[in-house]
Image (spheres, rainbow, N blue to C red):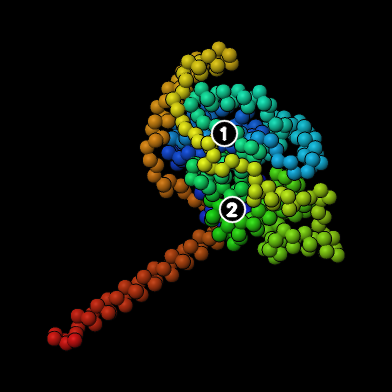
Amino acid sequence: TNEADLYQIISENAPDAVKSGEIKNQFGRKVAILTNESGETTSHLMGMFYRTLRMVDNGIKPLYVFDGAPPKLKSGELAKRTMRKAEAQEAAEEAKETGTTEDVEKFSRRTVRVTKEHNAECKRLLGLMGIPYLDAPTEAEAQCAVLAKAGKVFGAASEDMDTLCFAAPVLLRHLTFSEQRKEPILEIHLDKVLEGLGMDMTQFVDLCILLGCDYLDPIPKVGPNTALKMIRDHGTLEKVVEAIQSDPKKKYVIPDDWPYLQARELFFNPDVRPADAPECDFKWSAPDVEGLVRFLVEEKGFSEDRVRNGAARLTKNLKSAQQSRLEGFFKPVAKTEEQKASAKRKAEEKAEAAKKKKKEDAKAKRAMTAKPRGAG
């Protein structure tokens, strides 16, 4: 999948861009949470209630962003996708029975969109919990990126690597996973990604499109290393396409319906609300405890003790999240042997240079003090 390919490229070529840490390291941060058909955050009310509590317990102030209408790429493409989504739903059920985390994630993300009723219930729950949410005009990822770029939130939490293509400065993966999953939170910094890959933003977006983004299928047989090499060799997607089409061996075949220029346009000019729009004003407030009991206990059959206990945690922890956070909690992802050797070499060179400077300074000092009195 694109997710795995893009993550592989980043972790191999820009390892400094990825930090791995525990959820408590996000203390005091505001985070925009993507709420789309990933089957992750909106799976159902119980999931949303407990995951939100887990974030708030750890001093995070979540803001949920809901997907709007999908952008109209090509109606043909979307019709095909709808059909694939129905098939993916079946595959997802199967993957849940038999499969790995990655499989379940992959299929869940391609499954049929959550119903309007489901979203309405999630919004009702968030309102009662005092947790803000926004409706994105189209893509939630794009809206999260706008808020993060403007500094209204620290980063966007999503499993979707495409979020980086909308220029979100920080992407947090695994933040909304349940505690049982025991997955570390991955913090991916876009500036370090671009620096590590030696690319500008357009080339990075072109690379993601080439790997197969949410709007387009990947080109068959083009894996992560090939895609990276193609963008590095040719510079732009236009040139890559030209090279593929003019190759007499016809090694790669571009799918018939592959409007990559439109896909690029959607990443650079998505339909979003500006960060200073009134809809993007949000605040966290005290939960409506009795309202939560009526909704979750009386209507949905939750345990009253758990709901009241959860509401008490919300009240207490949203206050403590106001306290400032300390940066620098994160430990970077383990480096490869080669990187370790290179870092060691650099450190030794630095130490050598410092030693040399110290000697020279001492020599200069001696020369100064050795001057005969009255000289100069």
Q: For mark 2, does the 10 Å Cα neighbourhood hold few (<14), some (14 to 19), or many (20 or more) residues?
A: some
Which label lies toward us, 2 or 1? 1
Count of numbered marks: 2
Task: Please tell me whether residue 245 is drawn above or below residue 142 in the rendered image.
Answer: below
Q: State the residue lying farthest toward the top.
A: 298
Q: For mark 1, does the 10 Å Cα neighbourhood hold few (<14), some (14 to 19), or many (20 or more) residues?
A: many
Q: State the residue lying farthest toward the left.
A: 374
Q: Mark 1 highlights which residue? A: 134
The tag on residue 344 is none
Is 260 positioned to the left or the right of 190 in the image? right
SS state under label 1: strand
Quadrant of residue 79 in the image?
Answer: top right
Image coords of residue 154 (percent x, y): 49, 43
SS state under label 2: helix
Quadrant of residue 360 in the image?
Answer: bottom left
User: Residue placed at 53% from the left, 47% from the top?
Assistant: 149
Query: Three-letter amino acid code at disc 1?
Result: Leu
User: Residue placed at 68% from the left, 47% from the top?
Assistant: 266
Query: Three-letter amino acid code at disc 2?
Result: Ser
User: Residue placed at 39% from the left, 72% from the top?
Assistant: 353
Q: Mark 2 highlights which residue? A: 11
